[in-house]
Image: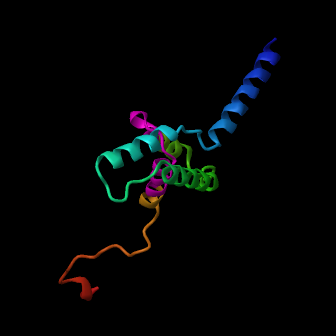
Amino acid sequence: MKVVLFSLGLLAGQSLLSVSDRVPELKVEALCRATSETDKAMGLALAQSVADCMRDETAAQQQLGTVWSATKSAVRDACEGEAVAGGAQSYVDLLTCIQMTEAANAPSSTPPLRGASKHRNKQ
């Protein structure tokens, strides 16, 4: 009996891992409709259409597919939470969060700044 429960636990754990390794499925249609309606109501000259918004969301989803598995799970979890906050769900927000987090955590290639010192040249 213990072996069966252990085996079931392993199977359940494996399916959870595979789900977290996939880009989450977000419902972006409502966001695109709301964005388009808001843009039109504000009288914006370049109001974004629902079709343009969906194209942007689809492109971001595809790009996420290439970076998702290489992104740390803590970053994925935090960014996914941000991308669905407030009820609006967006692949563009999710991708932007991941890109910004990775850029912020990347080592800088520029040397650190050194302040002025009258003793610097005496070393």
Q: Quadrant of residue 59?
A: bottom right
Residue ID at (59%, 39%): 25
Q: Residue furthest left?
A: 118
Q: Is residue 107 above or below residue 94?
A: below
Q: Is residue 65 above or below residue 18?
A: below
| Span of residues in magenta | 81-101
Q: Is residue 121 left or right of residue 86?
A: left
- Camera-side residue of 109 and 87: 87
- Camera-side residue of 37 and 119: 37
Q: Is residue 42 left or right of residue 70?
A: left
Q: Is residue 98 above or below residue 3?
A: below
Residue ID at (48%, 44%): 90
- Camera-side residue of 46 and 63: 46
Q: Is residue 43 left or right of residue 16?
A: left
- Camera-side residue of 86 and 44: 44
Q: Is residue 85 magenta?
A: yes
The N terminus sits in image quarter? top right
Q: Position of residue 99 (x, y in %)?
A: 48, 57
Q: Position of residue 20 (x, y in %)?
A: 62, 38
Q: Is residue 90 magenta?
A: yes
